[in-house]
Amino acid sequence: MKYLFVLTSSPKDFFCEQTLVAITSLRAHNPNAFVTLLTDDKTAETLTGTRASIKEAVDELKVLKLDEKYSPMLRSRFLKTVMRNEIEGDFLYMDSDIAVAGDLTIPGVWQGGIYAVLDFHTNLHKAINRKKVLNAAKMLGFSPIKNDEIFNGGVMFASDTPQARAFFRKWHELWQYSVSKNYPFDMAALAETDFSFGYVIKKMPGEWNCQLAYGKQFLPQAKILHFFGSRIVDTCGRKVPPGMDVFLPKILRKDFYTNLKNIPVHVSETGDDAGKQISINEYYDSVIKNAKDGFLYQTKKIGVLGADIVRSYAFAKSLSFLYKKTPFLIRPFEWLGKIL
């Protein structure tokens, strides 16, 4: 059983550091986990210096040579859609914009299957992106998603079976077709693949991919927190006082990742087949291991409705804009945070 991450990155972004944080959170709660990293040749060439620590943090590294003309986004989607046929053994795949918060021992009933959580934790007819999803399917000539289910690809369990391998081959084929139609995203292709296989994806419990802006009911028991990269806020070097924790948990701050570029990461073998231990420093280790506490703190301080608002994409974008353009308007949030 493997825990799989996919990485496409360059020194100019912070995806390598983000993936390292995700792996660190996994090992903090699952010390015996066997961790696999699938990456591309361009990315692998950059894993030197402090970036090389991610290679030490995993148990298996696989590098694929891809068309050099592919953009980073296309390389990422390419790797994700071929991962089942490049990695041996059952795996739980996780995006990098996550934090593991619990035991990820795979339930026996999942063996032999493909599992994921519904996108937005709801059926398609209730989803906020319903029209966008259906329009994409129509534009690509795909089915109209008759089972009313769209799965979030951020966390997926895939058994190593002939059916699962065939499923991923079809997904990759349909994704490549989507790219030919100038639609580089993979979710429409995933939905169409599920349709063509008779809807074989089975539903995981929501706590296995708690999409924070939409899955408040799963947060207390969440095993994996999926906060989405779009919610990470650039504070533009401005000092963030403790009162802002209620609006902006530390793990959602861009500098939490960019600062990691210059911090030594210590990876040690625990021995006796007990996996590896990753340690950064007291601050990072605590924030990563206790990531869920930051979001539970939000709910405690501002209630369920307030937490829903501050976890939204719109709030994150607004906060990013304020930090960049009118930082003085951040002060009311800082004052309110003190009161709360």
Image (cartoon, grey):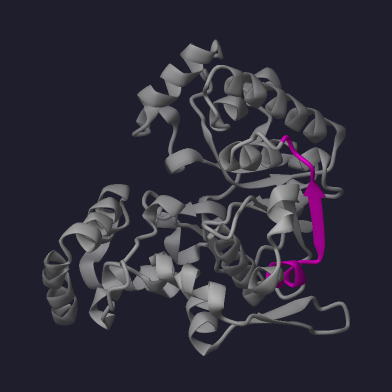
Q: Is 330 in front, or is 286?
A: 330
Q: Please state if 245 lies on the left or on the right of 199 as rendered.
A: left
Instruction: Answer with the quarter of the image where residue 114 lies.
Output: top right
Up-down relation of residue 71 to residue 294 (above or below): above
Q: Residue at x 73, y 24 (%)?
A: 170
Q: Residue at x 11, y 70 (%)?
A: 332
Q: Is 116 in front, or is 107?
A: 116
Up-down relation of residue 292 to residue 269 (above or below): above
Where's residue 257, x and y in %? 49, 68
Where's residue 313, x and y in %? 32, 49
Instruction: Answer with the quarter of the image where residue 336 lies.
Output: bottom left
Up-down relation of residue 9 to residue 273 (above or below): above
Q: Residue at x 30, y 74 (%)?
A: 245
Where's residue 184, x and y in %? 55, 29
Let me know if residue 193 appears in the view. no
Numbered range of the magenta stretch? 53-67
Up-down relation of residue 302 to residue 167 (above or below): below
Q: Is residue 66 magenta?
A: yes
Q: Residue at x 13, y 77 (%)?
A: 335
Where's residue 56, x and y in %? 76, 72
Q: Is 42 in front, or is 243?
A: 42
